[in-house]
Amino acid sequence: MTSYEKLLSDNKTWANKQVENDPEFFKRLSALQTPEFLWIGCSDSRVPADKITGTQPGEIFVHRNIANMVIHTDVNLLSVLDFAVNHLKVKHVIVCGHYGCGGIKAAMTNHDYKYVLNMWLRNIKDVYRLHREELMAITNEERRADRLVELNVKEQVMHLSKTSIIQRAWQNEQRPHLHGWVYGLKDGLIKPVFEMEAGTPIDPLYEYDDL
């Protein structure tokens, strides 16, 4: 059996167990999707949103990319955000990074990762530049990378607050709350590092006055 065939086999086993435990599981799941959370996480295979939060199918809406970035020109991310906020009516948007993130470590180097990755990592380098003084004061490289993970999460949450999608929902419905979390690969625990409640003031430069 090949590796991909094992995935298909394991899928059948999982589906059968679900039906054994709850015969109506898939009927309910196919009829309704009402997640309370949008999760913006890293693509890293070690950080599956449902596993580390103990959520079930239908409970968390997920978008993942390298280093859990919120980039204002990323139509993929923005379409997910729009759908989650305006159609699914999520109450919370979580940006979750993780310690030991390869994207963060790559952005801390001067290595040429070729055009596409260079373009993506540039956004993380911008976070480093904004917090250069604090980061350069950390002499241990691993701890510096960990701190950049935390600062990157904070900046991505702030990027969310600068979108018209979030600002309109804040103004009209006082939701969603924004959360910045970091997951620890070594202990499996999630650390909250930054929060923005609905309506939190931001730099007026980024506020829309005609929503």
Image: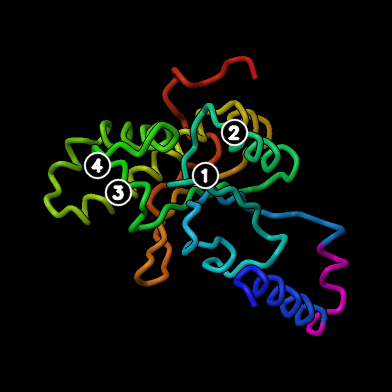
Q: CA distance from mark 3 to mark 4?
A: 7 Å
* Residue 147 in the image: above or below residue 24: above
Image coords of residue 151 (percent x, y): 33, 44
Q: Earlier in the sequence, mark 4 or mark 2?
A: 4
Which label belongs to residue 109? Answer: 4
Amino acid beneath label 1: Leu
For disc 1, the marked residue is 178
Q: CA distance from mark 2 to mark 1?
A: 9 Å
SS at circle 1: strand
How packed mark 3 is, by other alpha carbons closer than 10 Å (few <14, some 14-19, many 20 or more), is many
Image coords of residue 130 (percent x, y): 27, 31
Q: CA distance from mark 4 to mark 1?
A: 30 Å
Mark 3–mark 4 contact, CB under 8 Å? yes
Which label belongs to residue 66? Answer: none
Q: Nearer the viewer, mark 4 or mark 1?
A: 4
Q: Nearer the viewer, mark 1 or mark 3?
A: 3
Amino acid beneath label 4: Thr
Stretch in magenta:
20-29
Q: Quadrant of the N terminus?
A: bottom right
Q: Is residue 26 magenta?
A: yes
Amino acid beneath label 3: Lys
> In this view, which residue lies farthest toward the top?
210
SS at circle 2: helix
SS at circle 4: loop
Which label belongs to residue 105? Answer: 3
Which label belongs to residue 166? Answer: 2
Q: Earlier in the sequence, mark 1 or mark 3?
A: 3
Mark 2–mark 1 contact, CB under 8 Å? yes
